[in-house]
Amino acid sequence: MSDQIAVKVAKTVPAGATAVATCAFSDHLNRVPGVRKAALDRAGFTGSPGSVAVFDDGSQAIVVVGLGPSDTVGTAQLRRGAAAFAGAVGRHRRLAFEYPDGAGDLADGARAVAEGLILGSYSFDQFKPTAGQAPRIDSVTLAVGDDAQDVRTARAGVALGAAVADAVCFARDLVNTPGGTLTPPVFAERAAERATAAGLTVEVMDEKAIRAAGLGGLLAVNQGSTQPPRLVKLTYEPAADDDAGAGTGTSKDVDTVALVGKGITFDSGGLSIKPAEGMMDMKMDMGGAAAVIAAMCALPSLDVGVRVVGFAPMTDNMVNGDAQRPGDVFTARNGTTVEVLNTDAEGRLILADALALASEEEPAAIVDLATLTGACMVALGDRIAGLMSNDDDFRSTVADAAERAGERVWPLPLPDDYRSRLDSQVADIKNIGGGRYGGTLTAGLFLRDFVGEGIPWAHLDIAGPAWLAEADGENGKGGTGFGVRTLIALLEDWGENEADGDDEDVE
């Protein structure tokens, strides 16, 4: 698994650093300390975000990191630049990153740099025993100048960034693990172990408990598998404030937010079997559950102020003599009967049960994440998630959180008139909309039917950005951990907004 590098903060670059990053703005390339513009020109360096020019004399490497125009630099550029630096100096073990003047708020910037350094140095080596013999980055020192308060501010930012990046790396590890290794019981065990260590309350439902709970969608998908299903429920309780009731462990009036993640540990398509090429990367079909679990495990260290309950239904989607058949009907947790016409549209079936369970918590809002539809990738490509919601204000809230986190999402509609495409002649609803078009939207409409009335809900279709064939910024090839940062940003600000509202006594 991945070994996280240590990010430290100091006033100046330590003497032992063998690779030092100095940042450059694309409109000020003649002002890069210690490097002539002519040398940058010869290297073809333009200063665009994430570009690097390495000048290595064998004893120390000076790495010029591009941040783009000076008037647009923010956390996204710092994160991307730090990741590019970490990826460019793999042979060095002790690094330093000089924080640039004019890069905005230091606390946010230091957090972004820490995220970029850790994410940019990520690798998944579990099945490469010789990889551990190669030199690996040990530590990076963020140099912020002589002001003692700046050092304290940066250290606080780095601690937050390291916690977020560690969560993302955990999600990446889960997504990158083969489906034959990360079976549902193993996935649940790893989630429970991590969550327990983080201080969350953990409940793991086995097949007997799942059957007793009436989770018909999870059981239907699992029919074709020799691996038993699991459903993991995690609960985070924020620290009690001064007004909390005795023994409650939380504030009297704190909101609850529910998270739901699709956990298909391998997707063959079932009897509606995928072609060979379409099956190669299907170990990543649990990326939504990985993001939910990893984000929740980071909440205690970030001291998030809102109560959060997470649900991760887990099974693989395989083929055997009793696999669900096209035309079969099951009854979901909320009593809805579902006709299954395509067994490769299975993610929505297990999410339906989990959304029903989440709704029973009477939360202030629900967010679900799922590698749900190839149609979303057709619309938005492999680097942007589709965002759908039954509430315009909540959709904007989630989109704003994603922007702050540096994860790209794009709003898509849920047209009410498309809902009739899901009408079934033999059940309450069928699992596909029919025809080639609008598959992402009808999938969202299907999920909406399982959300409790009046609960704001957002659905993130992360089929594209959860897995990349080529590196992009702080995300390398393979599992990206997409969604972890968005969820954390949403929940962090939720807690802060609730606290602000309480102080001002406004609704």
Image: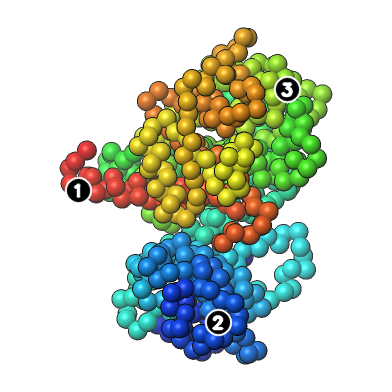
Q: Nearer the viewer, residue 380 or 183?
A: 380
Instruction: Residue 392: give x, y in percent of width and height.
Output: 37, 34
Q: Residue at x 59, y 87 (%)?
A: 60
- Residue 159, quarter of picture: bottom left
Query: Vertical placement of 148 versus 199: above or below?
Result: below
Is residue 219 visible in the rendered structure shown here?
no
Q: Nearer the viewer, residue 12 or 307?
A: 12
Label 2: few (<14), some or many (≥20) within 10 Å? many
Instruction: Residue 31: give x, y in percent of width and height.
Output: 43, 83
Q: Which residue is mark 3?
A: 324
Element type where label 1 sits in the image: helix
Q: Residue at x 37, y 82 (%)?
A: 145
Q: Which residue is mark 1?
A: 503
* Circle nearer the N terminus (2, 1): 2
Image quarter of the C terminus: top left
Element type where label 2 sits in the image: helix
